[in-house]
Image (cartoon, grey):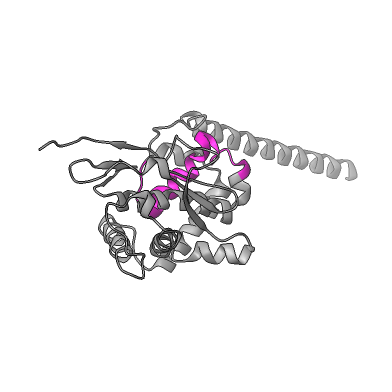
Amino acid sequence: MAGQLQLVVACTLAAASGLVLWILEQGHERRQENNAGRPGRYERGMREREYVRLIPDGEMLLVRSLLRRIYKSRGWTIDAASRERAWAGVLATAQTQAGGSWPMDFQPCDVTSEQLQALCLAVEQTFLGGLLSAQIRKSRRPRLQVELAVDPRDPHSWLSGLHEDNTIYINANRWRESISDVSPLDFEGTLCSSKLEALAHALGHELVHAVVLNFFPEMDATSPAYIPDDKHGPIFMLLNKRLFGHTGHACRRLFTVEG
């Protein structure tokens, strides 16, 4: 009787072990099938449905959770019409005295630090609901600063840049040309017909970097889903699109209309 019991137990354990191995093998095969069509690394020009698959599940959960918080805090939906009204509101605020009394076509030599801070605050409050500033205070990190100067790290290649101390450099030597209806600028999928509009969108771009730096410092430092393409990888692309409506991370002149 004891021998039969031992045999039954042994058979049961063998069957259970076989079942566990089968489950593991099936799971591995499913993962292989799921990954078969998955791109191996991020490449510029990928569509959203392609690059989001490169974001690890844990990081995606954090990003989606933050997006929900921001949508709730800013109090407006993410449809295109609402986003256009939000950008129009930023420009309207910027032209008021409280917003810096910005002209649509400014000259770099006339811009003050107070104007830059006011414009950055308008973009941050409108599109991030003030959560970035709150996170910076909570983390006791340096507050956001905007300076119109030559970026010592990148003086020529871009309109602006964020540093680790939360300073956004607006490269003065890149803001001398006129932007207008007859000489517009395509900023990451948005047609800008004034220098002020382009600057507001450039600040939005840098605020995406500030969001990752201050909410997710580990992602900022090491995530393969963020650091590719000079920190314009899938996480940046997703946040840039979902928060500001930007596609890509490049700007270019479209045409010049001569009278």
Q: Quadrant of residue 71?
A: bottom left
- Where in the figure is residue 20, as x and y percent of width and height? 68, 40
- Residue 246: x and y in percent read 36, 47
Rendered view: 120 above or below 36: below
Residue at point 40% right, 54% down? 243
Residue visible at 60% across and 59% down in the picture: 142
* Residue positioned most to the bottom: 98
Q: 109 left or right of 62?
A: left
Residue toward you, 166 or 74: 166
Magenta-drawn stretch contains 234:
yes
Q: Which of 50 and 141 is in front in this view?
A: 141
Horizontal side of residue 223 vs 203, given as left or right: right
Does the rendering let one see residue 48? no
The span picked out in magenta is 221-247
Q: Which is the main secondary structure of the residues drawn in magenta?
A: helix
Q: Is residue 14 magenta?
A: no
| Residue 153 visible in the snapshot | yes
Q: Nearer the viewer, residue 42 or 40?
A: 42
How far across and how far down the image is residue 63, in percent? Answer: 51, 53
